[in-house]
Amino acid sequence: MITGELRSKIDQVWNAFWAGGIANPLEVIEQITYLLFMRGLDDAELLEENRATRTGQPMRRRIFPDRRDGIGENGGVAYADMRWSRLKNVSDAGTLFSLVAEHVFPFLRSMAEDGTAHATHMKGARFTIPSAALLVKVVDLIDKLPMADRDTKGDLYEYMLSKIASAGQNGQFRTPRHIISLMVEMTAPKPADIICDPACGTCGFLVAAGEYLRDNHPKLFIDRQTRDHFNTEMFHGFDFDSTMLRIGSMNMVLHGIEDPDIRYKDSLSQEHAGDEDRYSLLLANPPFAGSLDYETTAKDLLQIVKTKKTELLFMALFLKLLKPGGRAAVIVPDGVLFGSSTAHKAIRKMLVEDHRLDGIVKLPSGVFRPYAGVSTAIVLFTKTNSGGTDHVWFYDCQADGFSLDDKRNALLPSEKIGPTPGHEEANGAGSHFVNLTLADEELAKNNLPDIATRWAHRNGAERDRPRTAQSFCVPKAEIASAGYDLSINRYKEVVHEQVEHRPPKEIIAELRALEKEIVEGLEELEAML
């Protein structure tokens, strides 16, 4: 969730664009993202330079070549002069403007190797800031934004969406970071995984999976084969919005993933040859935008479930993309869990009978505010093609660490938010993560650590939990006999406190005594007057 300080700084950038004549929100987002990316490239180059100096080894990858770009007179401009650390110190506004427009943006469009996802999406990058004065102001403001260890592009996009009136209609609101972290924590990505998000947007899920692997499997970067797998084969994202593809692609590169497969694809309309049975982990929160026509829907999805409903078609897509043994954590609207149509029941029966449905986490209805108030749940399952569902684990999440109104204010300090509370602590060798244990009153405000802990014990102690608890397990047979209803309220038992009422005669007698007292009091008052 975006901080108050970052919100204020981005507001300043936003207002500078508006005052400068750019009022289209997506255009503002794109231009800010390009500038953030330019700054990020310099940070990445500096990091590699420091590594080379520290180890005495040559640089593994040089972003800014040691030569001129060949554009214009005198062989053009040196690539080193295009680094953010140089650009921000250019004193003349006109010189900065021509440098960015005539040299930096052509460099961005051509910098990556041909054929990489990054190059494909950057080919359409356009510089549309209209004046040198606006560019100077925006460069100065962006230089003050804190970018260390955070998915700034995602934070930026999330906050910008609050300014876009159509956010609720086009479905392009970003999944909150702490919910993404929970889903990644529960699925625990492994170094050999092939991970996909078929509605990737800004690539928040893929970035979080990469960060999880860096934190939990640091040795994967020692071996060249696993390192190459991480950089070129592990991450796959599809979207049909070119702006999102560009932002998502840049986001991945800035998080140290060199050549992810981020590509244009309408996941529900295009056939899936080459992608079926391919992925071992699927993380997604796709946009659910109502219904499609049969004519525009991919035929291979209709073979799984014949429906026009996008939420059910996405469930069919998830099963199509996963390889046998592959696991998934996906967000669905509540209607998928209890809808009564033939298609709704068919997809739920498929999950329970043909594959292994592992768990359902009901999310609070305010999780996606202010963009949408829809009730949702996380569905966790494993594709087996041979059944395997024994018990299904349910959790009724009632608090995620933030207020559930449109303001979404944090209820706890930032280090106590998310599924793994804690903070970085410096030591002689750098820093290490210190885990924090939340008190009961803090867990009541943030259920996510409890969800992650109990999920790990779903095949053990959780089996014995009563139906009145916040989490419990339900046998497959009971779910089948309930028509494959997967809503938690179908199985949850509510404890009604027994209230003892006094006998009516006793209450009436007491009322009569009070009435008598009042009458006598009034008579005494009249006698005194």
Image: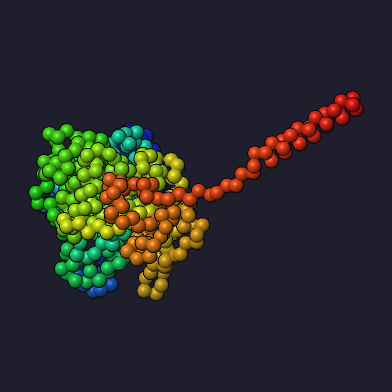
Horizontal side of residue 445 vs 94, given as left or right: right
Does residue 520 lie above or below 191 as drawn? above
Q: Position of residue 421 (x, y in %)?
A: 42, 61
Q: Is residue 49 visible?
A: yes
Q: Position of residue 295 (x, y in %)?
A: 12, 34
Q: Position of residue 346 (x, y in %)?
A: 21, 44
Q: Which residue is depicted at the point 39% across and 74% down?
A: 428
Disc tally is: 0
Does residue 361 lie above or below 429 as drawn? above
Does residue 268 lie above or below 143 as drawn? above
Q: Which residue is depicted at the point 28% across and 55% down?
A: 476
Q: Which residue is depicted at the point 48% across and 55% down?
A: 444
Of the pair 130 and 161, the residue shown nearer to us = 161
Of the pair 189 and 465, the residue shown nearer to us = 465
- Quadrant placement of the C terminus: top right
Q: Is residue 182 visible?
A: no
Does residue 165 lie above or below 193 as drawn? above
Q: Position of residue 85 (x, y in %)?
A: 31, 55
Q: Residue furthest right?
A: 528
Of the pair 505 and 315, the residue shown nearer to us = 505
Horizontal side of residue 413 vs 172, given as left or right: right
Q: Which residue is depicted at the point 24% across and 52% down?
A: 352
